[in-house]
Image (spheres, rainbow, N blue to C red):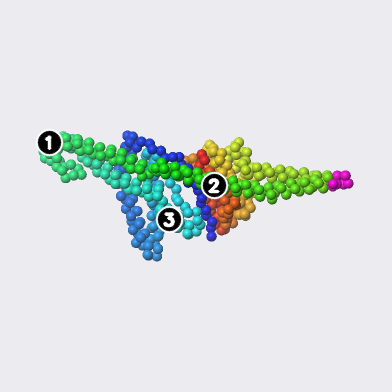
Amino acid sequence: MSSDTSTSAPPSAPPVTSPSTATPARVAGAIAQLAALGVVGPVIFTVLATMLALGIGLLAVLGIGLLFLVALAYLIFALGWLEAARVDGLYEFGLPPRRLRVSGRPGFGGFLRTLWLQAIDPLSWRAVANAAIATVLGWLVLVLIGFAASGVVLVFAPLFAEDGGITLAQTDIAVPLAWAVPVGLLSALVGTAGVIGLGILHGVLSRAIMVPSQEAQLAEAARTSSVQREGAVRAADVERTRLERDLHDGVQPRLVSVGMTLGLAQQKIDSDPDAAKALVAEAHTSTKAAITELRQLARGIHTAVLDDRGLDAALSALAGRSVVPVHLDVRMEGRCSRDTEAAAYFTIAEALTNAAKHARATECRVVVRLREPGTLWARVEDNGIGGATVMPGGGLDGIINRVVAAGGQARIDSPVGGPTSVEVSIPCAS
């Protein structure tokens, strides 16, 4: 049995903008893409329809149809992702990146739940609908391009054609040679105007289908803010509980012991000076240990080297103090915000602590990358016994809350027998 938890805050993308879709460059790009979709689109939707038919038709045959339906769900996501990337690349609407929806539940039931969430994802279906409309528009663009090209041929027909009628392409109309030039000019103008009009129409329809309304953007922003606020509150509560536990179980008993030792030394200072000196030395040692523990607690709240020298240096110091040997691989150009780096540092520190205390690990690997667009990605994997579960108020719960508060997403995978991996993605500007 495995424990696989994936938790995230809604993507904190900037509000979707509404640039002009009718600029000459964008209309020309739309025409070129529509022409390509007019050729490729029918093939894509034929494949999707075939997968659906096979899935339903073979569902009763030992459940083979399920394989086709699962593949269909992922093909729909892939088509939606490509369509969103195409539209955003052409018009620069600022659409949020598409991500696979996950249930966060372990086992086969969680997998089925994930498939269901993906199958009903409205963003994917809106993108597929936009692709279907663009395919139809692309077919019309190809027809009108042929019509316009035929008009150009008619304009030059008197130079090479013999007496008689010339058939206008895409129609069965025979145009007399005497009328070839005006009809050709009219056909070329109508075809060109139709192609341009379809290019403009594609931009209008794409904005209406793909770009969420202002009300939807505000509602999503409010929901994102609410999730992040709840994560921050839970993370602060978990951190407060940890500090109280560490102070109560570690520093406080040590300081009480120091006080008692000094009291004994005070009683013996006249009658047994040597014993008093030994007790004072013991109290001095305990005091230094208490100071070390307090420094470690302060470092757990926020390490100073993180602000001064960045995440790479802070992680190097963390790996050097780790009980478990750590292979550190950090590749970052530039820095992220303070909150982002602090969340990543806390995640890695807590994961290494869990590996040392609970996983019986003998080795850990930490990989950190600065990915596009502006996302800090980190992964910690140990070779321990696995079986870690997220408990309210525990270390893994603290990781999830801290990452969600920073607007990121966390994935924890810990099957029984290991290995355990913790993977987080956090926006750099959180």
Residue 288 — which label? none
**Residue at left offset 14%, top offset 42%:** 174
Rounded to the nearest angstrom, the CA distance separating label 1 from label 2 is 78 Å
Mark 3 and mark 1 residues within 8 Å of each other at the beta carbon: no
What residue is disc 2 on? 231
**Residue at left offset 45%, top offset 44%:** 220
Rounded to the nearest angstrom, the CA distance separating label 3 from label 1 is 64 Å
Residue 178 — which label? 1
Tag nearer the camera, 2 or 3: 2
User: From the viewer's perspective, is 420 left or right of 73?
Assistant: right
The amino acid marked with disc number 1 is: Ala
Please rate how many residues cluster around mark 1, counting C-alpha atoms within 10 Å: few if below 14, some from 14 to 19, many from 20.
few
Q: Is residue 278 visible?
A: no
**Residue at left offset 35%, top offset 57%:** 52
Residue 67 percent coordinates (x, y)? 40, 59
Q: Chief secondary structure of the magenta span?
A: helix
237 or 356, which lies in front?
237
Mark 1 and mark 2 residues within 8 Å of each other at the beta carbon: no
What residue is disc 3 on? 116
Tag nearer the camera, 3 or 1: 3
User: From the viewer's perspective, is 292 left or right of 268?
Assistant: left
Q: Is residue 166 above or below residue 116?
A: above
First to last magenta residue range: 267-276
Q: Is residue 285 above or below residue 117?
A: above
The amino acid marked with disc number 2 is: Gly
User: From the viewer's perspective, is 150 left or right of 221?
Assistant: left
Q: Secondary structure at mark 3?
A: helix
